[in-house]
Image (tube, helix red, strand yellow):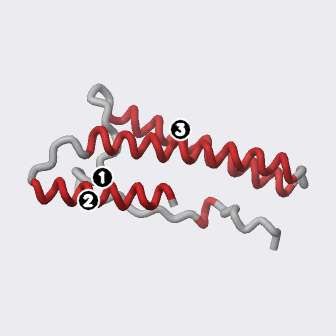
Amino acid sequence: MPPYPLLLASSDLQFAPPRANAQTACMSHSPDDPEADRRALQIRLRKITGQLKGVEAMIEGDYECAEVLNQLVSARRAIKSLAEKIIHEHLEHCLTAPASSEQGKRQLREVAQMLKRYVE
């Protein structure tokens, strides 16, 4: 086993299914083309996936550690940027007008929990 346990095969990745509740699971927010936002996020994610596959190839190709780490830093920044974009969109569009005071409190708890996980 190589000494790089951070890399996973794409078949090892598992994603949670989307939530049934559209109010808490909103993602696309462009009023003109709601699918445009989703496609843009998917493109960014594919680029990140490509970066990580490139890192895997670098490790298999016996590149210098500094070069591999430089690419990992780049991928980490791209992931951070993607997460920040999703957080921004969530805050701007998903939390605009809760139906009730209780729903507003629940949404704020969810955001606080999400941000707590993000900064860990």
Disc 2 to disc 3, how far (Cα)? 24 Å
- Which numbered disc, 3 or 1, marks the residue that appears first in the sequence? 1
- Residue 20's label in the rendered image is 2
Say which of 80 and 12 sits in front: 80
Image position of 49 with respect to 34: above or below: below
The N terminus - image quarter: bottom right
Name the residue beneath numbered marker 1.
Answer: 25
Residue that appears at 90% across and 50% down? 64
- Apparent side of residue 21 relative to residue 69 in the rendered image (left or right): left
Q: Amino acid at mark 2?
A: Ala
- The correct choice, above or below, for 6 with respect to 62 in the image is below
Q: Residue furthest bottom?
A: 1
Tell me, yes or no, whether the two marked residues, 2 and 3, touch with CB atoms within 8 Å.
Answer: no
**Label 1: few (<14), some or many (≥20) within 10 Å?**
few
Residue extending furthest left? 100
Give the mark nearest the N terminus, 2 or 1.
2
In the structure shown, which secondary structural element does the residue marked by tag 3 occupy? helix
For residue 43, the mark is 3
Toward which corner of the image does residue 116 lie, by quadrant? bottom left
Question: Looking at the image, which residue is at 85% across and 49% down?
Answer: 66
Picture quarter containing residue 86? top left
